[in-house]
Amino acid sequence: MAKIVEFKDIPLKELEIGRGQVRLSNIDKDIDDLVDSIRKVGLLEPILVSPLGPSGKYEIILGQRRYLAHRLLQEETIMAGILDEHIEEIEAKVLSVTENLVRSDLNRKDLIDVCTYLYKHYGSMNAVVTETGLSSEKVSDYVKYDRLIPELKKVVDEGDVDLNAALRTQDALAVEGNLDPQECLKLAKEMTGMSGAQRKNVQKKLRDQPNTSVDEVVEDAKSGGRVTQIVVTLGHQIHASLKRFASAENTTVDEAAAQLIEDGLSSSGYEENGDII
């Protein structure tokens, strides 16, 4: 593990934001409050940087928001702790997620992204738990990719199927017990082109009628079986919030809206035996 060898003021022009940052969403959220704080009381905690080789520049490992605030304040330098060596992206991500969890909750999408990245690197959810300090329950929730069978992971990695469709496919076909990889691939590719309501309809039909063939279920979903499309007018702020929710849940706006409506009806008592009434 790299160690801090000194603290000193570094010119902002000699700094670059590192690839290991885990906070990629809403980076500027409440940045004005941070700017005001630094203007009034100064920088209370130095950023952390590592050398970038012969260029003489440094990579920001921790503190990108403090760095951005200094830029807004038009400061020329910032106090930084300097590591004795350049560190790899994986180590930088571990440090970044750990610090951000201590400071405040990360955006859910960022946590899903970084936990999935770490899982792919380490190959174990226990390792992600150990390295980040997150609970095993949270890691299990964030590492959605880990739930997939190898065949579905492959098509998700290749971009042929979106993660949400793959997860819904596996959950739907798992009702029957042993998963048939070819059936999973067929359904996942079909579900990728479906709306959120159609995907839910597929899951429900396979849950209620597990002996129904994939072809029959897909045909029923495409023909609009028991699916009603509605048009809702939303204000700008509500629409923006819905888009953020959809992004955090790694799904479409259509499916996010359907999920929220279903959750709302369920919590209000309009659900019986798993069905909305």
Image (spheres, grey):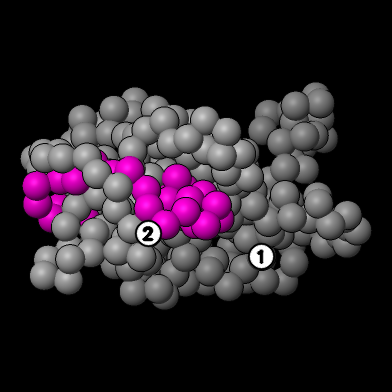
Look at the image and tell me whether residue 243 can be seen: yes
Pointer 2 with pointer 1, Cβ within 8 A: no
Q: Earlier in the sequence, mark 2 or mark 1?
A: 2
Where residue 106 sits: x, y (%)?
48, 39
Where residue 197 sits: x, y (%)?
69, 57
Query: Which type of secondary structure does the marked residue at label 1 adopt?
Result: loop
Residue type of the residue flagged with mark 1: Ser
Say few, some or many: other residues with alpha carbon within 10 Å of mark 2 (under 14 / 14 to 19 / 20 or more): some
Q: Reply yes or no: does residue 67 show up in magenta.
A: yes
Label 2, label 1: how far apart the Cα atoms are: 47 Å
| Depicted 256 relative to depicted 124: above or below | below
Write down the quadrant of residue 191 in the picture.
bottom right
Q: The N terminus appears in which quarter of the rendering?
A: top left
| Depicted 95 relative to depicted 22: above or below | above
Q: Residue at x 81, y 26 (%)?
A: 268
Q: Is residue 179 left or right of residue 110?
A: left
Q: Residue at x 33, y 38 (%)?
A: 46
Write down the quadrant of residue 155 in the picture.
bottom left
Q: Please report the bounds of the magenta region as a residue range.
A: 64-89
